[in-house]
Amino acid sequence: MYTVLDLLTRRAANAPFEKIAVVDGARRVTYAELLARSRSRAALLKELGVRKGDRVAIFLRRSVEAVTALFGTWFAGGVAVVINESLRARQVDHIVAHSGAACVVTDGRQLLSVPYLPHGRVSVVNVDQVEPSGPPASPEPVIGADLALIIYTSGSTGLPKGVMVSHDNLLSGARIVSDYLNLTARDVILSHLPFSFDYGLNQVLTALLAGGTLVVQRSLFPPDICDTIEREGVTGLAGVPTLWLQLTGRQSPFLRVALSTLRYVTNSGGRLPEHTVRLIRAAHPHVAVHLMYGLTEAFRSTSLPPDQVDRRPASIGKAIPDVEVLVVNEEGQVCKPGEVGELVHRGANITMGYWRDPDSTARVFRPHPLRERRNGSTELVVFSGDLVKTDADGYLYFVGRRDQLIKSRGFRVSPEEIEGCIASSDLVSNVVSFAVPRDEAENDIVVAVIPKESSTFREEALEEFCKRELPEYMWPRVIWRTDEFPLTSSGKPDRSKIRGAYVERSERPRRVAGAAGTA
């Protein structure tokens, strides 16, 4: 296989005619139908002027339409830019503008949530209104090294950065994960993670690689998830820590029902508490638990084999096949067991850098620390910013982040992006955001604000602004009103001291109704 297009074309050619590729509610789409729809979508994009290398923004919820838009883009020779369906106009506008998208593929539902999508700069294709009319398009010639996808993810500062992912990266990630999960055409994979999340997209690609079936799950209500697993005979379930805490909660049936078809579960996007791991293992001893770790810039990285989960439930494992990870100190030397250092990635999954951001690329994609330059060049590796340590057997344990990034519901969130949005509300004169632990797996986002007009400032007004302008995983749980900020020597708000003052003031913030709150 050479490009991601082969995942669909070869599978459609070899799968039984009635083999289901995607289950989306009441719809069941075969591999042959998925291929035909994708090629027709490509024809429409070409009619609209999309040419090889053009970026196509896909702003759709997880669905058959999203999958066909993705493959339609690739058949047309384009570069897919999958936008998280929960984003608001501010973030969508940035991604469309920064990527230089030639068009946006969306539907009426998404247009209701983002009423001022930038119609003036790009073509907007509403799949509810526009159906392909011409013959299916033949695929444009592409090679494995070509850019296939731009994934927008929060960096350590400012607005999201676009990670450039090649066809080779996508295929490598799908093949490696499919191999260690032992996926076959009999597997039925539940899809509830966004396609804009490399973890969620990899589920689509591994399902197609194995010839299995992808089941789109929209409700995250634990009984609904369990019903779908039993009804569709789901064999694989991926999640982030927030989902597993919900599924193992008192009101969830997940720990009480047999789920006999479930073969494996995976976790990524944050450390899963040991107690939760043991609950899952006790309730479903027949299920293989894979504790994984990944970084968008390196796509897939490490996994803890199921036979080690009971012994090392806090570990993120070792490097997956065709990948190497190093733990290095400030001097670029390999750390000894127990010594905390930065996790460095190398191998087939290393992506192509950041779109239109050479400075950030140079900071993260750097020369291999243990290899000398030869002929003026050297291999580039990814310095993750994640701090880890190893045990005596070489198994990795996550310690924390080197930068200020917040982990919220599996997403990396830049505090500066939150601050920039809130500053535009015209309600505050200064704002600082940070995270405080809610439990072993999740953080609360706190914003400390100095009101612009103290006498008229209302926390509720700022809450409503955040709900309009930010996706839910970026909503502050606590709004802390204060009169002044401690400053650094350069005159900037001192985030560490502000966070320390907040924690000292209240070890456990008081919550109010809704996602945001006041303290």
Image: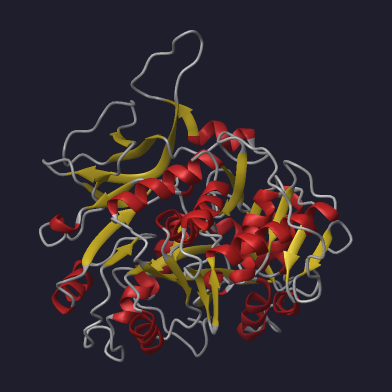
Q: Position of residue 481 (x, y in %)?
A: 56, 75
The reply, left or right, for residue 279 in relation to residue 460 is: left
Instruction: Choose top left, top right, bottom left or bottom right for residue 339.
Output: top left
Return the residue nearer the eye: 307 or 448: 307
Q: Position of residue 178 (x, y in %)?
A: 35, 53
Return the residue nearer the eye: 124 or 454: 124
Rendered position, 339 above or below 17? above
Which residue is pictured at 44% across the width and 81% down the height? 220
Rendered position, 330 above or below 246? above
Rendered position, 207 above or below 25? above
Which residue is pictured at 66% across the width and 68% down the height? 422
Residue extending farthest to the front is: 17
The reply, left or right, for residue 94 in relation to residue 207 is: right
Query: Is residue 406 visible from the viewing direction of this image?
Result: yes
Which residue is pictured at 61% across the width and 80% down the height? 463
The reply, left or right, for residue 315 in relation to residue 217 is: left
Query: Is residue 82 visible from the viewing direction of this image?
Result: no
Return the residue nearer the eye: 249 or 474: 249
Q: Position of residue 38 (x, y in %)?
A: 66, 60
